[in-house]
Image (cartoon, rainbow, N blue to C red):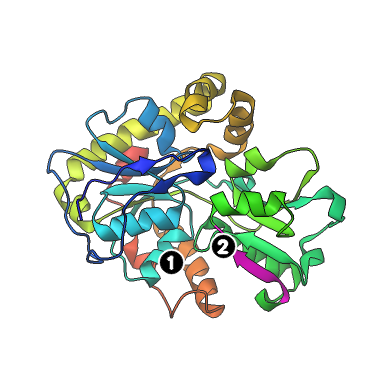
């Protein structure tokens, strides 16, 4: 397979997918690409979107992904050097023997993911969903939110009917009442906030929902200066966006293919400063990994703490 991967947007935002990213490459990465070019994987709403549209890495090759699990598959295939996901995809990727380093994170974003229900159904708490059908994207950040919601409500995962749907599948299933609840993140969350839709719960007090920056070991070794330079620009752009929310929304709305008011609302709760990767962050991820192991959501124990690599921390300071 070629190492170049281009994200294709089909129809609406929810139909974004990576074309041709298969499983045949080695788990250590097929190649590191051109020595002088950084290959960046991004999700359309992740913090990297602003960095892309602001031109922080004009010589880089950018590839678009619908979700974190798809992005980690590209790391596995050697199709990208660096990318950004939520907190659960790195754990599922590690369980799948994908080789990568965790080189950065963000401040917590708990308001950026939520359980959506139809107000007409009368649900007032997550416990009301016992026996009901709940949709979410398997292996994404909302997978950990589900675990914490079950724990808080005194429910077992067998007490609900879990339906694993990608965002492009989840929205129509939710709109047509094929599922009773949808656990989703921004901007899909913001796009679904229509009349009659209720936020049953978000991740506040349950999950930090940080973003994580992942890189292949080959890139960490062979493209360290490129990565360091890019991360510095990425931090500066992120800080600029937080300080200038109106301009940020104006710039990003066309890139996201979302109207400006929806973009503004989603960014107000989901855009957070970058943060250095620390042993404490490794401990936080390990708790999540151990929780997934306990529920048999991943095949066996994972030492996610060993993936933490703080060599680029100065870029976030």
Q: Residue furthest left?
A: 35
Residue 160 in the magenta stretch? The answer is yes
Label 2: how many Cα within 10 Å (few below 14, some 14–19, many 20+): many
What secondary structure is marked by label 1? helix
Residue 299 is left or right of residue 162, and the answer is: left
Residue toward you, 178 or 201: 178
Report x, y in % for residue 270: 57, 39
**Residue 186 visible, this orientation:** no
The count of marks equals 2
Label 2 or label 1, whichever comes before in sequence order:
1
Residue toward you, 73 or 297: 73
Residue at image location 46% in from the left, 39% down from the top: 44
Vertical order, 117 against 97 (above or below): above
Report x, y in % for residue 193: 70, 40
Work out which quarter of the rendered image holds the C terminus and state it: top left
What secondary structure is marked by label 2? helix
**Residue 177 visible, this orientation:** yes
The answer to whether the residue labelled 2 contacts the one labelled 1, judged by CB atoms less than 8 Å apart, is yes
Residue at the spot of label 1: 92
Report x, y in % for residue 225: 18, 40
Give the number of the disc on residue 143. 2
Residue toward you, 176 or 52: 176
Work out which quarter of the rendered image holds the N terminus and state it: bottom left
Quadrant hosting residue 274: top left
Residue at image location 23% in from the left, 56% down from the top: 78
Residue 266 is left or right of residue 220, and the answer is: right
In magenta, the rendered stretch is: 159-165
Residue at image location 19% in from the left, 59% down from the top: 30
């Amino acid at each position: 397979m070629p190492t170049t991967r281009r994200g294709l947007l089909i129809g609406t935002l929810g139909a974004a997918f990576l074309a041709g990213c298969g499983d045949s490459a080695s788990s250590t990465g097929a190649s590191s690409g051109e020595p002088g070019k950084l290959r960046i994987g991004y999700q359309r709403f992740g913090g990297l979107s602003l960095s892309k549209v602001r031109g922080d890495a004009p010589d880089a090759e950018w590839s678009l992904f619908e979700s974190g699990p798809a992005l980690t598959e590209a790391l596995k295939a050697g199709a990208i050097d660096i990318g950004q996901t939520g907190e659960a995809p790195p754990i599922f990727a590690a369980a799948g023997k994908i080789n990568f380093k965790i080189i950065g994170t963000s401040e917590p974003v708990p308001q950026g993911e939520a359980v959506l229900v139809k107000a007409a159904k009368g649900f007032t708490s997550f416990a009301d969903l016992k026996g009901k059908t709940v949709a979410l994207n398997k292996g994404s950040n909302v997978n950990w939110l589900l675990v914490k919601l079950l724990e808080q409500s005194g429910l077992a995962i067998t007490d609900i009917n879990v339906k694993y749907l990608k965002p492009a599948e989840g929205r129509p299933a939710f709109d047509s009442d094929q599922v009773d609840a949808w656990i989703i993140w921004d901007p899909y969350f913001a796009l679904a906030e229509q009349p009659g839709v209720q936020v049953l719960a978000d991740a506040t007090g349950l999950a930090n929902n940080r973003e994580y920056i992942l890189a292949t070991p080959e890139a960490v070794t062979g493209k360290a200066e490129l990565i360091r330079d890019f991360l510095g620009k990425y931090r500066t752009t992120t800080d600029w966006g937080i300080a200038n929310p109106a301009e940020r929304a104006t710039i990003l709305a066309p890139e996201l293919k979302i109207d400006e008011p929806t973009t503004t609302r989603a960014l107000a709760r989901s855009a957070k400063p970058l943060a250095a990767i620390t042993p404490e962050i490794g401990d936080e991820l390990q708790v999540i990994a151990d929780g997934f192991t306990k529920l048999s959501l991943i095949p066996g124990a994972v030492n996610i703490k060993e993936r933490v690599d703080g060599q680029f921390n100065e870029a976030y300071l």
